[in-house]
């Protein structure tokens, strides 16, 4: 008898690496959870997979991966140094997109070249200048990015620069026209820079996964989750890692929908670093390129509309002037976890209980990850700090007393995301209050007492009893519930990230949250406010059960915490299909001439319908090629026309301005041969229209 094929989902997050086996019907067969080991990802991944039933590993026909590593790198301001070659750009566009910040200590070079809106060359490409820059930068950066003005209308200059970089270096290279089809040159360059800077992170993760799969004789295709919840092959993810920026949040939405289907719901995923909130309407999340906001950046990537904030189990509990207690957005290592991993630290904490309090109390430093080009750029003190971190946590309090220059170097490593501090967190508070005990309860008690002393003696805040860990921990829990309530309201208000300034939205959200939960009233209850009672609150993630029952009670909405909710991301990693999009633009540069912007250059037609048909053929072929490269087997192709035109009342005719012909190729991922998965038939549909104006200046 042939055993049923299984799918293995893996999620590598900031705190945990999760693994789950799903049967062909999407049922959970087995789950596993292990700590993420940032200094060597293979350890955490191996620990998770090894908890799964060994006899099931031979049945695995597909492996799919989601991760928050790329998201966290962007949010925390990390990334490897990049050389960005910009053909035809000007300094104003560079400044607007803040590209000098994104290249992470690399180089942003303006090169004569680029095209106009019609796809014609603005000025010749200066390959001689480009050659000099590439030779100068090739040993200083981890990757190259290329973007040309109107490169989506004519990619010739980008292709020439890509070929030049490939001939002179062995470094990864990314082009703007490969990542996005929309105009707005600054955002496209920003997207290219992000993509190039993230390649080493995704490369390390994919290498780790492949090594472990090989060790266990798992010979199945390896996929990754994109920000829109669909799947791509590992090779495609390595070429376009920017598409995985919201991989973790998208996987949590897909996983929650798989575990607990709802037509209308608010899905909240709380992890160690962030809380990610998505709205499900009529059974589907919203997919939008405008909605992709990572920290302060808006890369040109289509993704599930997710509202993310730095609030998780590992968020630092701190003092904030004018507010008092604040949680996040910085992630730290919980003291309970630090001692769980490094038991020798407990003795130091015990000895310090009666010592003088300083801002560095509860502060140790732990190594994360440094790419080769980052290690080459270390100062002598940073190199020493990195070397010492390899032996275990560094006591920042002691180090500051013995070697101030080394302490400052360590702080720079933390700022660059190469190392991380420890601190008091909501996870520690939960240990103190008896809500969980998977790490060191004693360390959490000590950390709570020390933190309360810091708040009182350094900042003059708090009236907790001496040596009592429960008082401050209860305050942290209460603040978490209050912050989550405001975040849910803010997510409901954030239908368009560019619509309302985030400070104004957050202020409104706190006010509405208090009204909904009954903590505030207007003129004796003159009016009331409530969430839609038809929507359920679906909470997933390891800390969800600690806080969301009270949140749901405050908001008077039904709550669902699905079985296996703590591994929802891993479930979502294998609950999706492959989906690839392509777009070909048609314009009318002069009356009666319709220009199709084909991949190899513009093509003109005398008939609009012929131009649109040609654009559909090109878009369909591009989407098909992308889907096959992304790992789809059989697939369906849908064609959609988005036309900008107006009625001319004088001539009773339609005046055409511009059209975008879009193709979407959707299919199941190709499984290991012999698994018997059924594919999807071919098909096409869709026409609509609206108006816009072409500009690449941003």
Image: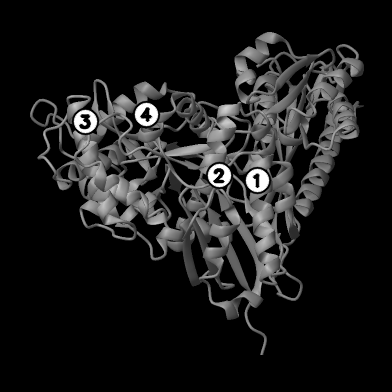
Q: Is residue 452 left or right of residue 342?
A: left
Quickly name the residue at label 4.
401
In front: mark 3 or mark 2?
Answer: 3
Which residue is outermost to the front? Answer: 402
Q: Secondary structure at mark 2?
A: helix
Q: Secondary structure at mark 3?
A: helix
The CA distance from mark 1 to mark 4 is: 38 Å
Q: Earlier in the sequence, mark 3 or mark 2?
A: 2
Q: Looking at the picture, tell me which residue is in the foreground, 529 or 481.
A: 481
Q: Is residue 335 visible?
A: yes
Task: Mark 2: give few (<14), some (14-19) or many (20+) Cα within 10 Å.
Answer: many
Quickly name the residue at label 1.
202
Q: Earlier in the sequence, mark 1 or mark 2?
A: 2
Q: Earlier in the sequence, mark 1 or mark 4?
A: 1
Q: Secondary structure at mark 4?
A: helix
Tell me whether the residue at label 1 lies in contact with that at label 2, contact meaning CB atoms closer than 8 angstroms. yes
In front: mark 2 or mark 4?
Answer: 4
Q: In the rendered structure, find residue 69 and report the number of the disc placed on it.
A: 2
Task: Mark 4: give few (<14), some (14-19) or many (20+) Cα within 10 Å.
Answer: few
Task: Mark 3: give few (<14), some (14-19) or many (20+) Cα within 10 Å.
Answer: many
The CA distance from mark 3 to mark 1 is: 39 Å
Q: Residue at x 30, y 29 (%)?
A: 359
Quickly name the residue at label 3.
455
């Amino acid at each position: 008898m042939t055993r049923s094929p299984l799918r293995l989902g893996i999620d590598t997050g900031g705190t945990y690496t999760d693994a789950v086996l799903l049967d062909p019907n999407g049922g959970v067969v087995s789950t596993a959870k292990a700590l993420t080991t940032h200094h060597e990802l293979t350890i955490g991944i191996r620990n998770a997979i090894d908890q799964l039933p060994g006899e099931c590993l031979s049945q695995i026909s597909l492996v799919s991966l989601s991760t928050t590593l790329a998201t966290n790198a962007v949010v925390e301001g990390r990334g490897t140094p990049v050389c960005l070659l910009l053909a035809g750009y000007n300094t104003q566009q560079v400044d607007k997109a803040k590209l000098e910040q994104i290249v992470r200590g690399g180089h942003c070079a303006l090169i004569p070249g680029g095209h106009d809106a019609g796809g014609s060359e603005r000025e010749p490409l200066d390959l001689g200048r480009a050659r000099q820059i590439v030779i100068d930068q090739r040993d200083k950066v981890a990757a190259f990015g290329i973007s040309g003005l109107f490169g989506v209308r004519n990619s010739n200059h980008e292709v020439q620069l890509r070929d030049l970089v490939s001939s002179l270096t062995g470094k990864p290279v990314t082009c703007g026209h490969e990542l996005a089809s929309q105009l707005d040159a600054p955002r496209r360059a920003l997207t290219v820079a992000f993509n190039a800077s993230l390649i080493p992170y995704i490369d390390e993760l994919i290498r780790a996964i492949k090594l472990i799969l090989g060790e266990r004789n798992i010979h199945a295709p390896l996929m990754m989750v994109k920000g829109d919840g669909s799947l791509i092959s590992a090779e495609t993810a390595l070429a376009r890692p920017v598409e995985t920026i919201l991989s973790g949040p998208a996987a949590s939405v897909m996983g929650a929908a798989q575990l607990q289907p709802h037509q209308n719901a608010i899905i909240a995923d709380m992890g160690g670093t962030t809380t990610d909130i998505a709205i499900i309407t009529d059974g589907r999340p919203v997919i939008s390129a405008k909605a992709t906001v990572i920290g302060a950046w808006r890369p040109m990537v289509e993704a599930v509309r997710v509202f993310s904030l730095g609030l998780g189990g590992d968020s630092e509990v701190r003092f904030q002037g004018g507010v008092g207690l604040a949680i996040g957005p910085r992630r730290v290592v919980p003291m309970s976890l630090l001692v769980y991993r490094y038991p020798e630290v407990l003795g130091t904490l015990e000895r310090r209980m009666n010592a003088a309090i300083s801002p560095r109390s509860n502060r140790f430093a732990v190594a994360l990850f440094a790419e080769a080009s980052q290690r080459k750029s270390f100062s002598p003190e940073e190199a020493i700090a990195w070397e010492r971190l390899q032996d275990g946590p560094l006591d920042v309090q002691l180090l500051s007393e013995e070697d101030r220059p080394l302490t400052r170097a360590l702080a720079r490593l933390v700022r660059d995301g190469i190392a991380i501090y420890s601190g008091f967190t909501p996870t520690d508070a939960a240990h103190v209050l008896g809500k969980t005990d998977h790490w060191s309860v004693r360390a959490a008690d000590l950390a709570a007492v020390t933190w309360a002393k810091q708040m009182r003696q350094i900042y003059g805040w708090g009236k907790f009893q001496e040596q009592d860990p429960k008082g401050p921990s209860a305050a942290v829990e209460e603040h978490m519930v209050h912050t989550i309530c405001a975040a849910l309201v803010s997510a409901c208000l954030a239908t368009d990230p560019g619509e309302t300034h985030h400070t104004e939205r957050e202020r409104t959200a706190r006010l509405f949250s208090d009204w909904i939960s009954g903590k505030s009233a207007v003129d004796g209850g003159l009016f009331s406010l409530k969430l839609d009672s038809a929507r359920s609150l679906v909470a997933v993630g390891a800390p969800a059960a600690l806080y969301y029952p009270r949140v749901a009670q405050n908001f008077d909405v039904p709550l669902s915490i699905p079985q296996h909710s703590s591994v929802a991301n891993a479930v979502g990693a294998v609950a999706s299909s492959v989906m690839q999009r392509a777009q070909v633009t048609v314009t009318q540069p002069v009356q009666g001439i319709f220009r199709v912007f084909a991949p190899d250059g513009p093509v003109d037609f005398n008939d609009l319908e012929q131009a649109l048909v040609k654009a559909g053929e090109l878009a369909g072929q591009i989407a098909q090629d992308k889907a096959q490269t992304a790992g789809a087997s059989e697939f369906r192709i849908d064609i959609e026309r988005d036309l900008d035109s107006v009625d001319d009342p004088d001539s009773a005719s339609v005046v055409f301005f511009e059209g975008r012909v879009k193709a979407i190729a959707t299919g199941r991922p190709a499984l290991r041969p012999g698994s018997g998965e059924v594919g999807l038939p071919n098909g096409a549909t869709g026409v609509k229209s609206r108006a816009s104006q072409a500009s690449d200046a941003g």
